[in-house]
Image (spheres, coloured by chain):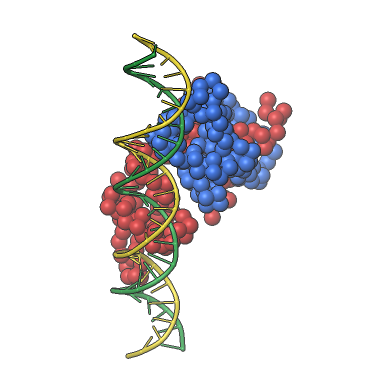
Chain colours: A blue, B red, C yellow, D green
Amino acid sequence: MSSTKAVAEVIREWSEVFMRRSGRDFRGFMEETGLSFSQINILMRLHHGGKCGVTEIGERLGITNAAASQSIDRLVVQGLIERTEDPEDRRAKQLALTQKGRTLVEQGIGVRSEWIEGVTESLTSSQREMIISALTLLTESARKTED
Amino acid sequence: MSSTKAVAEVIREWSEVFMRRSGRDFRGFMEETGLSFSQINILMRLHHGGKCGVTEIGERLGITNAAASQSIDRLVVQGLIERTEDPEDRRAKQLALTQKGRTLVEQGIGVRSEWIEGVTESLTSSQREMIISALTLLTESARKTED
DNA sequence: GGATATAGTTCACGCCGCTTAACTAATTAA
DNA sequence: TTAATTAGTTAAGCGGCGTGAACTATATCC
């Protein structure tokens, strides 16, 4: 069924559909929350990677730590992240999501999940099973290739 | 293998991995090209939806047509899109990607595709086959739910 | 033909996010 | 203990991107 189509082509088409949808969701999320692309990225970094300092955030986003410091400050003011002194090194700050921030990020991820769930709803249960297996494999394999 | 884990959970985890990766790629793409989030969205819209006018772009992005007009103008200056008069209605403009713009968008999509291809490379051929089938199903089903 | 509506552009203005540079404070090295 | 390094903040300034308002040009409606 799938072997007639080139692997790369299938993946390319899926990526395109997914990206288009992601873009729309992301735009909606930015509007709802009033957060910028960078700010959402900072929240995502903290959600996945746990506590870290200001400079690391800047490096991850490819901006100076001055810019990072300012963006972070806006997020702190909004109560989405907390900035505490690192007890091991009092020059450094430890950044972490507040409960409010964590809830927000999880909502953002949830929107995308709901979409895929909706997409799979109209399929047969064996098709759904196959998709579950495939996504599980992809997730595991993708995690191995992460930094 | 997958039935032990809740469907929703599998999808959620995969969304998270994919989104994290997408965010990183997208940021890289913005840096490389010097384009903003909005500008890339405009290019994506034109890539997928074909020719359209300024106001429609604005509506899609949730901004005024004044803002859309300005963003579009920057893209025209950069040679990524062309803005011609609509022969049917001379008030309106027809926006379309130039070859340069099309190439750029396809590069952006390509980056993500390469990543998934890389992720699937370490799998067995039967696993790859399953993923191809699953993604084909997802793509077809997702397209049906699009506007 | 004249009033009204529609498609885009331009202008003045403000906010946000970025940069560089100068700064404070804490740590590490000599 | 002094000097150099490192983490972060602050300030001034710039450009992008957004807004509303005023404008031009075309199309449509009576």
In x, y percent, where is residue D13? 30, 47
Q: Residue at x 40, y 52 (%)?
A: B42
Image position of A123 with respect to B146: above or below:
above
Does residue A109 show up?
no
Identify the residue at horizontal 59%, vertical 40% (top origin): A101
> Relative to C2, does residue A73 appear above or below in the rendering?
above
The answer to whether residue B123 is left or right of residue D18 is: right
Q: How many marks?
A: 0
Front-most of residues A45 and A126: A45
Give coordinates of residue B39: x percent, y percent.
Answer: 39, 49
- A60 and B109: which is toward the camera: A60
Quadrant location of residue A48?
top right
Does residue B17 lie above or below B52 as drawn?
above
Q: Which residue is depicted at the point 58% across and 51% down?
A: B145
Pick the residue in front: A6 or A19: A19
Residue farthest to the right, as pictured? B4
Q: Is residue A75 visible?
A: yes
Image coordinates for residue A139, horizontal then vertical, percent: 57, 29
Q: Quadrant of the N terminus of chain A?
A: top right
Residue D25 screen position, x and y as percent: 29, 74
Q: Residue at x 51, y 29 (%)?
A: A93
